[in-house]
Image (cartoon, rainbow, N blue to C red):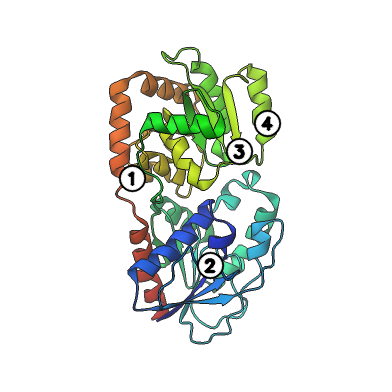
Amino acid sequence: MKIGIDARAARWYRGTGIGTYTYQLIYNLNLIDSENSYLLFWPEENFSDIHPGGNFNFKLIDEERKDNFWDEVDIPNILTDTEIEVYHVPQNGIGLPDKKTCPYVITLHDVIPYKLPETVGPSYLKIFLEKMPDIIKKADAIITVSEYSKKDIAETLNIPTNNIFVTHLAAENIYYPMDREKAKQLLTRKYGINDDFILYIGGFSPRKNIKGLIEAYYKIYKKLIKPRKLLIGGKPGKSYDDYKELVNKLGIEDHVIFSGYIPVNDLPLFYNGADLFVYPSFYEGFGLPPLEAMACATPVVTSNVTSIPEIVDGCAMSVNPYDFDELAEAMHIILDDSKLWEHYAVSGFRKSREYTWKQTAKNTLDTLIQVGKR
């Protein structure tokens, strides 16, 4: 079977959830499948990251670079190769061609623009809400990333569940346990971070509940047996100024570190150097950061809502993200109880090993072949 894939996110958006998903999917399809042939719509001549096999071909596309990724991928690729038997768009179906020449499969990661529109950037919100009804009409099948997201998509968009296929994600291979002291030393050398810290990584959208995290940290930072700062990692985004203002209002600016953008290859240093990873999100279709922390054997405190309980499966300490006292207490307990800390470090690591990108690729390939044969 000849499979077409819109691969732009793997090149343009690597380091984000959808970019990582697209890259890992293609990379692992390359590892597991030598029977089917692939045509990847790719924006430049550098294919070295993928190490393509002989059954992978590339269609170079014009780089319609814009200020916003969603504006870029909203320009559909032109399917002139009539031998393509199924076409996959991994970025929520955005950029699905108008003219249909074969069955279409999209990966719809979540329906956050419908459920929490106030937490989504205006450009993406506009494109998603305008395009999604037509995308759903054209798509022959939907892949999503959790059972929770499958249920949410079915109910929100009125789609039969038998046409939605779940493929869990995984932590990349760069996430593994390191010597913690060595990780801390490297963080000191590269980033000037000398303190023990609690870590958050995962974007600045209001739905990530960073305000709740800051409030919870404020409740406990003086009570901890060993002092820890709160390190909030990532490129400043929506609501960043609000978080800085809250930190200043609480008078804890000397105890909260905003690291700025962290290159993907340095993220394992932060996960391994942290004493605790906290991810109190209000809504996730999957939620990769807790799994990445677990893969580094760092204990996790996270939310007990949406898809997160399905993914961590009791191997992280789960709390009500709307209850800041409960969040604070969980952080306090796990940091000051060495046995509990060790329990979640070990159980989280073991759980993370159950998720692999090869399995994601296999499940995706099974769906693409099934739809292509209809």
Q: Position of residue 53 (x, y in %)?
A: 40, 74
Q: Considering only vertical position in the picture, is 169 above or below 2?
A: above
Residue 7: numbered disc: 2
| Precedes in sequence: disc 4 or disc 3 | 3
For the N terminus, give its image quadrant: bottom left
Tell me what residue is drawn at x 48 percent, y 73 percent: 140
Q: Position of residue 178 (x, y in %)?
A: 36, 37
Residue 242: numbered disc: 4
Question: Is residue 110 in sight in this rendering?
Answer: no
The disc labelled 2 sits on which kind of residue?
Answer: Ala
| Precedes in sequence: disc 4 or disc 1 | 4
Tell me what residue is drawn at x 66 percent, y 35 percent: 240
* Distance between the alpha carbons at the discs numbered 4 and 2: 35 Å
Secondary-structure class at tag 1? helix
Choose top left, top right, bottom left or bottom right for residue 370: bottom left
Instruction: Please name the residue that numbered disc 1 is placed on.
Output: 352
* Distance between the alpha carbons at the discs numbered 4 and 1: 33 Å
The disc labelled 3 sits on which kind of residue?
Answer: Pro
